[in-house]
Image (cartoon, rainbow, N blue to C red):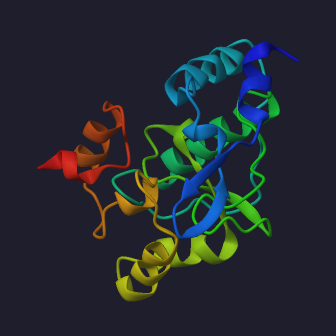
Amino acid sequence: MTDRKQRFIAQSKLDLGDKPVRPVGYWEMDGWDDRAVDVQVRAAIRAGHPIPISRYPILKSYNGATGQERRDCGNRYVVGRELGLIPWPKFCSVCCSTRFVGAHNCNYFRPCSAMPICRSCHRLIHRRFYDPSAWMARAHEHAYEGAWFTKIAMTELSREQSLWLATQDDPFDVSQLG
């Protein structure tokens, strides 16, 4: 195991005052750089690393990305996990649940920025465009300073907005859009 991989597996704690202590994820640790991981993933694919084969139909467009772009993004994320560049999600980055944890990406032009998220939070986050109150209640319940899920758009982003956010340090922070 390389030193880089070991650095992101350790789970430290974050004190939230009156809220329970929550684990700190690899994406919050100093040195985590999703763009550098994506460069390594792309190089591995070019060198012949197999790309996952999906049995599911192409998804609809979302936040400016086509269904095929969403699939390609997911494939790169999976390759990153297979290569050990992205740790396997152990808990939901929203509610800290350890049950049915997958990944969610708000910006498909930054594939390795996908966040670990449980099935319940994932359902709510995708429904936020037409049922914002349920998502807002969940986000408010689990919010902490700097939480990625408190910065996302409550309306679907255009392709141009998503592409621009993908060039920023924080691809979730829609307040940067002005």
Q: Going 53% across and 26% down the picture, which residue do you hit? A: 33
Quadrant of the snapshot with the N terminus: top right
Q: Nearer the viewer, residue 10 or 69?
A: 10
Q: Residue furthest right?
A: 1
Horizontally, residue 121 falls left or right of residue 79, namely left
Q: Going 49% across and 78% down the picture, which residue do you hit? A: 141
Dividing the picture into quarters, in which one does residue 93 lie?
bottom right
As drawn, 77 above or below 30: below
Q: Residue furthest front?
A: 17
Dividing the picture into quarters, in which one does residue 99 lie?
bottom right
Residue 86 image position (x, y, % from top left): 70, 34
Residue 88 image position (x, y, % from top left): 78, 44
Horizontally, residue 52 falls left or right of residue 22, namely right
Residue 98 image position (x, y, % from top left): 79, 65
Residue 176 image position (x, y, % from top left): 20, 45
Q: Nearer the viewer, residue 90 or 158?
A: 90
Q: Going 61% across and 21% down the picture, which residue do you hit? A: 42
Q: Residue furthest left?
A: 178
Q: Nearer the viewer, residue 161 or 90?
A: 90
Q: Nearer the viewer, residue 148 or 154?
A: 148
Horizontally, residue 16 falls left or right of residue 174, namely right
